[in-house]
Image (spheres, grey):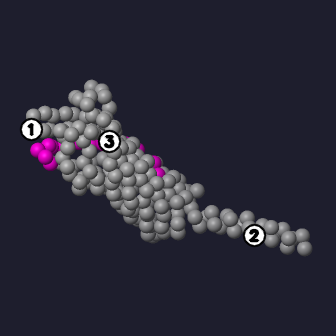
């Protein structure tokens, strides 16, 4: 009788463990390269250097093949603006906060995935010797984010994750109206590589 009572008490605990395993989570950290296109608009040309940064992510598995993911990113680069009667160079950084839906496809240790969601991008100038104007200010813009990649299972807890990400957003001008291109279809391309830890 005591054994039966013990087993009955143990069932809720076993159920909670099973639920925890079914709703796995992971955190990830990746190196990011940011490639921005040359933008033309309103007689303004906007170019940017290759950006380097980090991407931190948290993924909550809704099912074994679908998840919600939240990301934070920090990337630095230099942007150069050329207008008919002026030009400016701004060294700055971009921060990202995003939420996306992730769909995975499981093939043994290889797990390809695609994602799509929304993001808020925050651009901030850095006033140093690389910046030729101190008139710039922090600016933000909403964006659509999408991408795809592959996760390779190194162990039950660790994955190597390689991904291509992209944004569609309004072209940033650091609050400088004379360098506003009025371009909305602005693609920021980002290859990433990093690791994910499952728990």
Say above or below: 5 vs 25. Answer: below
Side of 190 relative to 195 (left or right): left
Q: Please report whichever mark, 3 or 1, sits nearer to the chain's N-terminal start.
A: 1
- The image shows residue 140 at horizontal and vertical percentages of 33, 45
As measured in the structure, the alpha-carbon distance from the residue carrying label 1 to the one carrying label 2 is: 74 Å
63 displayed left or right of 183: right
In the rendering, at what x and y percent does residue 139 appear?
A: 32, 41
Residue under the point 67% across and 64% down: 17
- The numbered mark, 1 or 2, whose residue comes first in the sequence reads 2
Residue 138, located in which quarter of the rendered image? top left
Residue stretch in magenta:
41-57
Q: Which residue extends farthest left?
A: 84
Characterize the local packing of mark 1: few (<14), some (14-19) or many (20 or more) Cα atoms within 10 angstroms.
Answer: few
The foreground one among 9 and 90 is 90
Residue found farthest to the right? 1
Mark 1 residue element: loop
Which of the labelled discs sits on residue 181, or is there none?
Answer: none
Secondary structure that dominates the magenta span? strand
- Disc number placed over residue 11 in the picture, else none: 2
Q: Position of residue 19 (x, y in %)?
A: 63, 66
> CA gap, disc 3 to disc 2?
54 Å
Residue 190 or 197: which is nearer the viewer? 190
């Amino acid at each position: 009788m005591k054994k039966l009572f013990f087993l009955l008490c143990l069932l809720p605990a076993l159920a909670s463990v099973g639920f925890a395993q079914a709703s796995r989570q992971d955190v990830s950290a990746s190196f990011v390269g940011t490639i921005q296109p040359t933008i033309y608009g309103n007689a303004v040309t906007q170019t940017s250097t290759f950006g380097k940064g980090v991407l931190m992510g948290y993924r909550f598995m809704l099912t074994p093949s679908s998840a919600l993911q939240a990301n934070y990113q920090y990337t630095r680069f230099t942007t150069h603006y050329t207008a008919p009667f002026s030009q400016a160079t701004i060294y700055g950084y971009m921060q990202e906060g995003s939420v996306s839906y992730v769909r995975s496809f499981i093939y043994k240790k290889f797990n390809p995935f695609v994602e799509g969601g929304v993001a808020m991008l925050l651009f901030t100038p850095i006033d140093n010797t690389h910046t030729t104007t101190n008139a710039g200010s922090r600016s933000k813009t909403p964006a659509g984010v999408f991408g795809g990649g592959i996760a390779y299972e190194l162990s039950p807890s660790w994955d190597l994750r390689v991904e291509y990400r992209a944004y569609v957003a309004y072209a940033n001008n650091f609050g400088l109206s004379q360098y506003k291109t009025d371009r909305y279809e602005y693609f920021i391309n980002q290859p990433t590589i990093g690791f994910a830890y499952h728990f």
